[in-house]
Image (cartoon, rainbow, N blue to C red):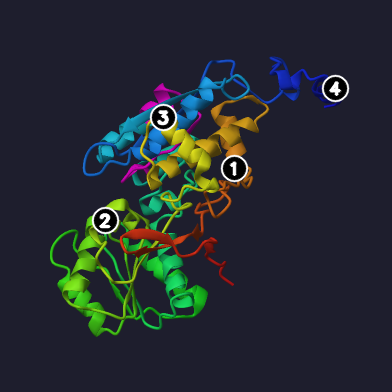
Amino acid sequence: MKLRSAFIALGLATAGLAFTGSSAFAAGPTCKDGPIKIGAVSTVTGVVDFSDAPKATKAVFEQLNEAGGINGCKIEYSLADDKGDPQVAAQAARDLIDNKGVVALAGGASLLDCAVNAGTYNRNEVLAVQGVGVDPLCFNAPSISPVNVGPFTLTTVMLDYATKNLGAKEVCAFFLILGGTQEAYGNAVAAWQKLTGNKVGLVDMTLPPQGDLTPYVIKARDAGCDAVLTNQVEPGVVQWVKTADAQKISGINWLFLAPGYTEGVAKALADSKQPIYVGTEWEPYTESNEANADWIKTMDKAGLAKTAFSQGGYLAAKVMIDTISGIDGDVSRDAVTSALKEGKELHYSLAGSPYVFGDARVHSPMKSTKIMQLVDGKWTVKTPDWYTLAKAK
């Protein structure tokens, strides 16, 4: 180590000099076998398109490569489309691991990648920094740690906000259940009850993916709910609020998760006087501020849409770059896995919680949100400071 310190003092290490002998003399990451290979399994075609996340990840890596890479090492990024098909997802993961030889996965956003491939990633000691964790396994597997808060933790946070900041006394929740999410949403509600000692007035897990929502809105009114949380995406959010307007309902705060935070929702509900709140997973993407500055610059240079999903992809790439930058020696799968499992806290301006992978059975490091309120058709920041879920006692 004294010899290495001497080289650093002479300025050789900062000039990018790499030693090919003992790793003890390595000045940062090296890549003797060529570009560092990273991949992602995402749903791009099929019922939904989550490609904003991996496209943003790719853009960050490409701009890094243009600047010379990490200590001269460039990144080769492979995106596999699982098409929302479990068999295709499984094949995509095997191809990335066995044929492309990825050292890690980053920026993925998929309906089913975590559920299908978490075991495969774990058996092969390849870790995934998910750009947007969607299904419950994304937050309940040793091989995956998403950079987003996720719908389940955000459910707990929004229930907490309703009582502490909106003064709600009778909080109710309505959930659309897709796949194996029922237990996860149930656990999210239970976590809030355990954390606060409060009780949910009503939990309904029978919301339909489409159809008339009038019976549900009426049910909330008749149950005396003064705050209602639902997990619908953009069309369902719009339909729910318009139904409340049609029924002339008042006195209820309507809370939604991150998928409700869109320009489409704001435009569609511009004339509604209902109190509408959503929780973000990162710094609000509609805000042009210092926290978002580098993400905005990166997306603009790449010609990509500035969306919440692209924030997730951007952040996943940053996590991977910072992790690799801390490696001394060859950037192998083992080296990246070990570095992520060290559990170093990584802080980013557009995230309210430090990101940690670590060596644990499950990973859900992000616990903070910023609440947005829809006012006259515009999203307004309700909590300038991060609203962070307290740790259970």
Residue at mark 2: 267
**Image quarter (top left, top right, bottom left or bottom right) of the N terminus:** top right
Which residue type does callout 2 highlight? Lys
Residue at mark 1: 341
Question: Do labels 4 and 3 touch, CB within 8 Å?
Answer: no
Q: Which residues are the magenta region?
A: 94-113
Q: Is residue 19 magenta?
A: no
**Which numbered disc covers residue 6?**
4
Which residue type does callout 1 highlight? Lys
Q: Residue at x 43, y 39 (%)?
A: 313
Measured in 3D between alpha carbons, the distance from the residue under mark 4 to the one under mark 2, in whole angstroms, is 61 Å
Residue at mark 3: 302
Give percent across and percent down for residue 293. 51, 42
Measured in 3D between alpha carbons, the distance from the residue under mark 3 to the one under mark 2, in whole angstroms, is 27 Å
Which mark's residue is nearer the viewer, 3 or 2?
2
Which residue type does callout 4 highlight? Ala
Q: Residue at x 20, y 63 (%)?
A: 239
Question: Do labels 1 and 4 touch, CB within 8 Å?
Answer: no
Disc on the earlier residue, 1 or 4: 4
Which mark's residue is nearer the viewer, 4 or 3?
3
Q: Which quadrant of the structure image shows residue 235?
A: bottom left
Disc on the earlier residue, 1 or 2: 2
Q: Residue at x 54, y 39 (%)?
A: 319
